[in-house]
Image: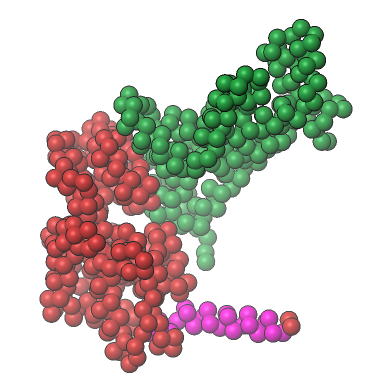
Chain colours: A red, B green
Amino acid sequence: MHKKLLWILGAALAAGSVHAQDTLAKVKASGAITMGVRESSGVLSYTLGGSKYVGYHVAICEAAIEDIEKAIGRKLEVKYQPVTSQNRIPLVQNGTVDLECGSTTNNATRQKDVSFANTTFVEEVRMAVKANSGIQSVADLKGKTVATTTGTTSVQTLRKNKRAANLDFKEVFGKDHADSFLLVESGRADAFVMDGSLLAGLIARSKNPADFKIVGEVLSVEPIAIMVRKDDAALLKSINGTIARLTKSGELDKLYDKWFMQPTPPTGATVKLPMSESLKDALKNPNAKPMEDYAAK
Amino acid sequence: MTWDWQVFLQDTGAGETYLDWMLSAWGWTMSVALLSLAVALVVGSLMGILRTVPSRALVFVGNTWTELFRNVPLLVQIFLWYHVIPQIFRPLQQVPSFVLVVVALGFFTSARISEQVKAGIQSLPRGQRYAGLAVGLTLPQTYRYVLLPMAFRIVIPPLTSESMNIVKNSSVAFAVSIAELTMFAMQAQEETSRGIEVYLAVTALYFVSAFVINRAMLFIEQRVQVPGMIGVAK
């Protein structure tokens, strides 16, 4: 009995070590690939209910998986695994998720644990305010209350800006983006500092989109990319190849237009966020530079 | 996996280290917990007593209070206090969220304490009440000098659990923007990517806080025990 248990344990460990190796070999052997997706990350990656996941990044990943299928010469079963800000990195590291297609910022700290494909979206952190509030820039925040969401990098951005500008404002934290937006809607906060695409999405889905607007300078620029296990060169090469193909053929622009400029399911709300100069630049010169390199500019 | 405990010495970007921030978060957790506990003990005892008096109207008030706050989930109650009630009563919008959380958590726990105080009073033989009234004490005096001294001693063990629970339940305060330990954990792990270290440290602080309360209550229990009375185990 004990021997049998040991044998099973040994087999499990062996299987575990296979996970840590080359993802292409792993998916070829298992016939299945797992995509990490988000429940609600603006139009980058979100759920339509049930187990249906869509979005700009999900679409890019689906194209990448088609290319992987061609490369390894077999059809793959695509599994969708919802992830959160807290568990996405561990799940990629331990092999539960093969490629994460959410809204993960590529930064130097994370590059110690995982690898990123070339940047496919550039997020600009700005603020959403009520249209009639008169707030135009960060300087107008003096004495106001500013909301942001717990567990996001925007909190840190806000803190740094506060110190740099020597401004005095109150901070409140929503437990998720919808909650933070509610703080502005109900008047508990005057501004909501967050990724531009998320703000645009929240405004588009609100009761009265005309009541809100996105204003102020860009507080921080963050490259968003598909995340894979660390140093998986073969998989990275394949994904970057897909991104280059989509960029060259103009399909990426079409995908951007579809998710950011046209009505999106399920409500038909339109985000209306034209492609930023930083993203155009990142697509022209494909790179996987971390956020720190953007800040230096 | 490698440990990186020096993460606590990093600068958060606001001129303080994560350690400073964590200790301040611990302060918020304990402030919320202890103030809520005070509210819960006062209101809970009052409601528990009301549920045992002869007046039907007062019993009804006590029962309604207890059932109302016991049957609604804590997080929902917090949101009601924070988002819904201030929309109905506008002046409440000026009240800081810290006060709202203390009230919400205090009232939620008061329902549970009321149940325990009621049970403590009812566990006493009925003759005690009649004896008190028979020697000429008024009803309040009977409670003050005869019933409550014994009832409270009997319910110290469940009150201990409740006092420890309130420390742990205070973690819901993160939902309404109190910078307490749970919020610190969520935020710091995102900023530093060292979630395991951050959560272990926060877990230790919660454990220490609850355990100190446990020991303090045990001390009280032993100091106030009456030899030969039920409900005291030594």
In the image as oriented, which residue stretches furthest toward the top?
B136
Front-lying residue, B40 or A28: B40
Residue at the image point whose x is 24% and y is 81% from the top:
A241
Query: Residue A270, located in which quarter of the rendered image?
Result: bottom left
Residue A110 against residue B151 in the figure, above or below: below
Quick check: A291 left or right of B132? left
Q: Is residue A207 visible?
A: yes
Quick check: B146 left or right of B45? right
Residue A209 against residue A221 in the figure, above or below: above
Front-lying residue, A7 or A122: A7
Q: Is residue A161 visible?
A: no
Residue B128 is situated, as x and y percent measured from the top left of the image, at 79, 20
Residue A290 is situated, as x and y percent measured from the top left of the image, at 29, 64
Residue B203 is situated, as x and y percent measured from the top left of the image, at 56, 49
Q: Is residue A26 magenta?
A: yes
In the image as oriented, which residue stretches furthest toward the right?
B228
Query: Residue A116, located in which quarter of the rendered image?
Result: bottom left
Split into 4 quadrants, where in the image is the C terminus of chain B? top right
Prevailing SS of the magenta stretch: helix
Q: Is residue B127 magenta?
A: no
In the image as oriented, which residue stretches furthest toward the bottom?
A73
Residue at the image point whose x is 34% and y is 39% from the top:
A172
Number of callouts: 0
Residue at the image point whose x is 18% and y is 45% from the top:
A208
Residue at the image point whose x is 28% and y is 68% from the top:
A54
Residue B149 is situated, as x and y percent measured from the top left of the image, at 74, 21
Which residues are drawn in magenta? Answer: A3-27
